[in-house]
Amino acid sequence: MIPAGSLLVAEDLRKTYGQTSALDGASFSIHPGEVVAVLGPSGSGKSTLLHCLAGIIRPDTGRIRYGGRELTTLSDAGRSALRRTDFGFVFQFGQLVPELSCTENVALPLRLAGARRKAAEQSAREWLERLEVDDIGGQRPGEVSGGQAQRVAVARALVTSPRVVFADEPTGALDSYSGERVMQLLTDAARLTQAAVVLVTHEARVAAYSDREIVVRDGRTRDPDHAV
Ligand code: ADP
Ligand code: MG
């Protein structure tokens, strides 16, 4: 059964790598604008679940529906187009382009979508300001702190106004003070733009920023609030 009003729903996902079962019956659903934390120990299948939900990898079996479309039957090109237009990503290590300035990094997704340089960089600067790092726009990622780089990565994820932001251990490489700040800014920005957030983490304090939590263990999901 698909919960009413869901934006992204996955049912009974299974995925194996050789002998290793990464997902063994994982289900998930998220509403527009909702922040859902995916918790679980290292190796439990959280990143594999996120990669399936985001259309980066295909599960072996199971269904994933996004806004009325079945992701698992879309072509690779179809899924990659969807990732560009509808999804934003924040990973543990910002994965910014080292040769570009922070402003250019944030402007890049808009440039790839066809925006002119001036307009893209204007939006990028506004996003850097929202993330309180407008002072480092001209610097390269290698010249700023880990916390600053991660705020730039959050700005880059949100600049295209995605419907869903996928964040995989976004504070995993930060000290707790910078981590808390990044989480606060990420969830504030997502609420502002009404983006849903799939927040993968093994840190309970990070999950405190979510509306709802689900737990992954041995590739299976458990939702303490809803049975999905
Ligand atoms: P988590 O993000 O919770 O740490 P993962 O989803 O990364 O867990 O991994 C779940 C299981 O699948 C682990 O046993 C991991 O070693 C295995 N796994 C994940 N990705 C791959 C891969 N590309 N190749 C082989 N094994 C993988
Ligand atoms: Mg992981």
Image: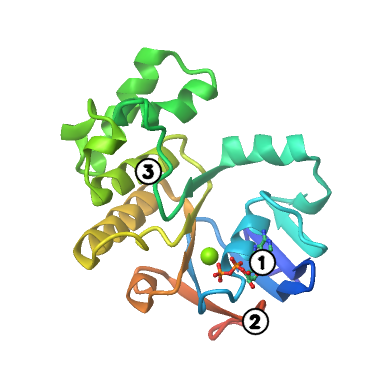
The N terminus lies in quadrant = bottom right
Res. 5 in view: no
Q: Which mark is residue 153?
A: 3
Badge 1 amino acid? Ala
Q: Earlier in the sequence, mark 1 or mark 2?
A: 1
Q: Earlier in the sequence, mark 1 or mark 3?
A: 1
- Alpha carbon distance from label 3 to label 2: 30 Å
Assess disc 2: are there few (<14), some (14-19) or many (≥20) residues with their C-alpha within 10 Å of its C-alpha. Answer: some
> Seen in the image, is 139 located left or right of residue 7?
left
Res. 105 in view: yes
Assess disc 1: are there few (<14), some (14-19) or many (≥20) residues with their C-alpha within 10 Å of its C-alpha. Answer: few
Q: Residue furthest bottom?
A: 224
Which mark is in front, 1 or 2?
2
The C terminus lies in quadrant = bottom right
CB at mark 3 closer than 8 A to ligand 2? no
Q: Which mark is residue 218?
A: 2
SS state under label 2: loop
Residue 133: x, y in percent? 21, 40
> Seen in the image, is 17 located left or right of residue 184?
right
Residue 172: x, y in percent? 37, 63
Q: Which residue is mark 1?
A: 4
Q: Marks 2 and 3: in contact by CB < 8 Å?
A: no
